[in-house]
Image: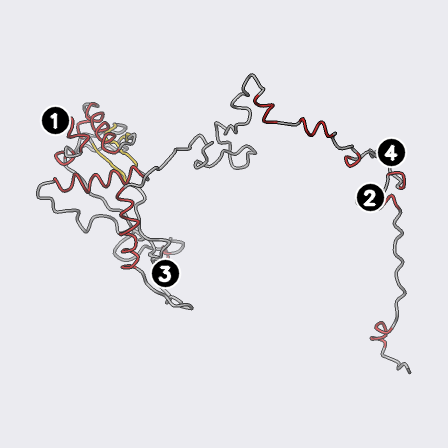
Amino acid sequence: MACRRVPGSLSFLCTRQPPRARPIITPIQRRSASTETPATLEVSEDVDPSSSFQTPPPSEDTVQSFDPVARSRSRTKELPPSRYRFRPPKYYRGPLHPHQPPPPSDPSSRLFLPGPFSLPRLEQTYTTTIAPDLLTLTYLHLPPGFRPPPRAARLREWDDSSPYHKNRPARGPRGDDVLRLLKKPTNFRNIPKLEGVTVHCMAKGAKDDSAYLHIAGMIIQAISGVRVTTHAARKSVPQWGIRPNTYISVTAELRGEAMYHFLSKCVDVVMPRIKDWKGVKGSSGDSSGNISFGFTPEDVALFPEVEVNYDM
């Protein structure tokens, strides 16, 4: 076979490089499983030549005599209860601390609350009836590949007709300075549901006598089953005679099972007994999922926890 001369730029492709010499690995540099006897390897004096694989197995008598159950039964004194129990930290020292408390759902947590042992009737009605109906009424099907049309910016920019418009923040929507919440398409993941109920009461007589505030707090705590929080006035209102730092109102935050029990009590017991009650106004709320309504003192007396004191 004849060889043809190739240009200089391609000569390096035809030049055969000699094979590189491999480094010689001595036994002292080799790292492998200990399948050979230590006598055949050159081991440094700083390395212990003994191995756990060379330890003889326990005798047959030792294996037969090992019985942990009989050992525990023969123990006269019980082990302390905290020996094998996990103790959660008393204080939370941040996410980087090596000792982290367990989640509140863990029975060993200090914040663990057992339950719920049974679902409230209102929650069962929501799960079986109200939630499917809401999904049917508000569901909007979007085919695959659908792209929503572009929308204008929610905040309006200035037209720079005046030098004072420079570096000004964008303006709110026309007619209202409050931005409404963005409405996402309803699916099975974001069906509207109850998240919390806030019971608030303001005692006008508390500005002169704190006994009014104590009575309001006891009533709210009795009908809600939750410890109340007192609030002080931040500003002065001369028309009502309210001075700053004067405690005049109480609030109770309801979540979970207590929320459903209180709301079902209002719907099933209190509201049907109100005379000439026209219901909650359709314009009530802020169009962002919050609805508010109130009861008069005569209506609050219809709660079973308050009515039983009048019967006495």
Q: Residue at x 9, y 41 (%)?
A: 275
Residue placed under numbered mark 3 in the picture: 153
- On the image, the x and y values in percent for residue 278 come to 12, 47
Q: Nearer the viewer, mark 3 or mark 4?
A: 4
Q: Is residue 299 left or right of residue 3?
A: left
Q: Between tags 2 and 4, which lies in front?
A: 2
Amino acid type at circle 4 is: Glu
Tag nearer the camera, 1 or 3: 1
Residue 45's disc number: 4
Q: Which residue is mark 1?
A: 311
Labels 4 and 1 touching (C-beta < 8 A): no
Q: Is residue 259 left or right of residue 5?
A: left
Residue placed under numbered mark 2 in the picture: 35
Location of residue 197 with respect to 20 vertically, above or below: above
Mark earlier in primary sequence (1, 3): 3
Give whichever of discs 3 and 4 has the lower sequence position: 4
Depth check, mark 1 against mark 2: the one in front is 2
